Amino acid sequence: MQATRLPSRWRRLLLLLVPLGLALCVWQAIQLARDQALDTLYSEAHNELRLSAAGVSAYLSRHDYLPRLLASREAVGRALAHPDDAQVVDRLNRILDEFRVASDVSDIYLLDRQGTTLAASNWALPHSFVGQNYGFRPYFKEAIQGRMGHFYGLGTQSGERGYYFSAPVWADESGRARIAGVMVVKVLIAPLEANWTGQNGELLISDGNGVVFMASQPELRLMSLAPLDAEVRARLRETRRYDGARLAPLPLDRLSSRPDGSQLVRFEAGPLAGRGFLSVSRTLPDQNWQIHMLKPLDSLKSAQWQAAFLAAGLYGVVVLGSGIGWQRHRLRRERELFANRERRALAEGQARVRGIIDRTRAGLLVLDERSALTYLNPTAQALFGHTPAAVEGRQLTELLAPADARRIDALRRDAWHRSTAESPAIEVVALRPGGQHVPLELTVGALVSPHGQRWLATVFDISERKAQEQALARARDQLEQRVAERTRDLLDSNRRLSAEIDERRRAETDLRQAQDELIQAAKLAVLGQMAAGINHELNQPLAAIRAYAENASAFIARNRLDAADANLAQIVELTARMAEISAQLKQFSRKSGDSLAAVSVQAGFGYALRLYRARLLSADVTIIRDWSADEVWVHADPVRLEQVLVNLIGNALQAMTDTPEPRLELSIANVAGRVRIAVQDSGPGIAEAHLGRVFEPFFTTKPVGKGLGLGLSISARIVEDLGGRLEACNAAAGGARFTIDLPAGEAAPAATRHHAQEDHHA
């Protein structure tokens, strides 16, 4: 027992190592949880920054065409030519107000060559711009030099923050074009900040000088990220960009920087005093702004505490499990030692008992050459129920049942021929006095004796064995009965299993139908996400159509038919663009059919690229097309094939979000009656640990709430239904590569193909 216990010095060492291990484990868990929580916050901030930056750019860029459009109107030129005509100026004021309402901007006003406001949409308001001189503004200086102007700052009259667009107004004087004035459009910034209230964090936008121009917290606006030097302040005063604001430095304490470019910061005063944040920044190159996302670190402490408790719990479980394992090992060792001692004692006892059993258990009978009994040992006497005196000289067959007599003679003759060999054992029945029958096992062998030929008969009582055989027979009968019952149960189970298989087949059919509905619902969900962009795509052409129609009407009234034709041509082009947008939406939203036909792979790629045209242009993605000039056809369903291509290209664009020079490679190859369609990006690729799971349902590496992990799973299922397969790998040059393998289709006749494409793109 003592040999199974640890020495005392080891026990003291364990008492020291267990707390140290606990502290190390908890510390490592806290560090890991902190790093993971910061990585999660960084990913969330990066995605939110990207969306917010896109929203700011879209909000500001949707009005950049308006000054140029208004500058071409005849009423503007007439007002600049007759600035003293009150009727002309008043009519222009009303026109500018109508455009302000239609385009949802803050103010529209016209400056003459000296920068004085000649007409404005707010001419009737107390803070009207009419008569105010804005020649000091950079947007006026840029436009008066013939360029499109942009400027952001505080309004000198209204005090509201805004973004200004300006365009030169050209006039024809004596056959020469000259700049007669500047058209200015002001867009308020406040509506953008109203959309930031739902963010889980604080958003700031700073200009090139580090001045916070926009912020989700009003108290942080018009403050600087760092103290401004005298030269910068003088330049700001000259343009009156912030119109005398103090521009005090933010009470921000930068704690540390991370390898991904983010920073840990803390506010020392203000509404965010005492709180820690993860600061992530992004550049808005068109405006030379920096957009900052401050994610609160509250979840970081919670994650660290949870990790600490979890690590401590797991460590405790491991220590407890180790202790239990050690105790079980000790008990097993002790049982083995005890069992070894018992086995040795049992072996010794068995050796002693075996000697006794060898001498006393078997009944021994000695027969002379005439088979007469000459000796019975005590065991034999007990078996036959006779004393030696009562049976001496009698034949052995007299003590057995009559049927066994002939068997004994044959057994003795056989043993005589084998000399000293022992005969096989046979079963006989002994007759005791009183008629009792005792089953025995008997062997006969020759016994060498100086007194002549002798026989040694050995008998064993097999009453117990016979009883066991009878019990075994009964058990066998019961077993056979149970086997029959079990067989019946198995037959019933097989019938139930067959019914379950049928039910599962029906469930698979229902699941396939549900998957088709899920695919359609996913397409409609994409349409919902595209609604805001499509609204923007349609609103711009509509506003331009109205302006071109009004210009065309004015040109026709003046019999300037060439100018009117040019405006009408612009209207036709804009309506064709709107028809193309609506046709793409109608095509994307309709359900796929069940019949397969010849589908052009190039047409499918063309459709997917048209859907992502805006994203491809905004991200400056280089598209490489690797296929022959001839059309390549596959045997598939056009809608389902296009949905797979749309999903793969969308995933590629998302993977290249942070790639400096994004490149999208599309290829088509016809190999031995099969068509291999590949989509490859230049992003970071797929982790080796994830390559085997990318097509599993609900598997995703995106943050929570950014995706369900169904896109690739549904795409793989669609390709399998079309008789092909979808594969994923990492390209040698970097980036992920997805390959679709489909059976090649025969090219449809030209007329049939033309009608099919019309039906498909209707």
Image (tube, rainbow, N blue to C red):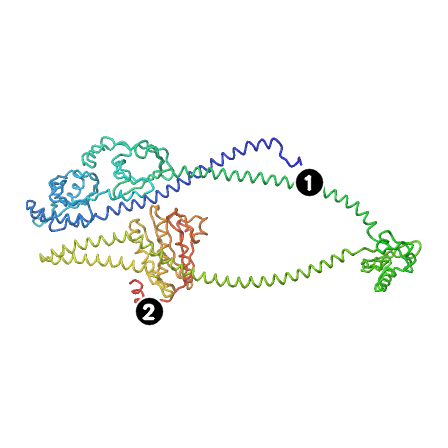
Could you tell me the amino acid type at mark 2?
A: Pro
Q: Nearer the viewer, residue 677 or 726?
A: 726
Please state the horizontal and vertical placement of residue 414, each as a whole percent of the image: 85, 62
Q: Are the residues at dot 2 and dot 1 in contact (C-beta closer than 8 Å)?
A: no
Left or right: where 144 falls relative to 472 = left
Residue at far right of view: 451
Query: Which image quarter is the N terminus in?
Result: top right
Q: Nearer the viewer, residue 498 or 62?
A: 498
Residue at far front of view: 434
Q: Nearer the viewer, residue 384 or 204?
A: 384
Marks 2 and 1, how far apart at CA: 89 Å
For mark 2, what is the residue?
749
> Which residue occupies 53% across, 40% down?
317
For mark 1, what is the residue?
337
Left or right: where 538 falls relative to 342 = left
Quarter of the view holding residue 419: bottom right
Give the secondary structure at mark 2: loop
Please state the horizontal and vertical placement of residue 294, each as a whole percent of the image: 33, 39
> Which residue occupies 35% across, 46% down?
659
Q: Nearer the viewer, mark 2 or mark 1?
A: 1
Please state the horizontal and vertical placement of residue 20, each as a whole percent of the image: 52, 33
Q: In the rendered view, tell whether residue 744 sits above or below residue 692.
A: below
Please state the horizontal and vertical placement of residue 240, each as a whole percent of the image: 18, 36
Give the secondary structure at mark 1: helix
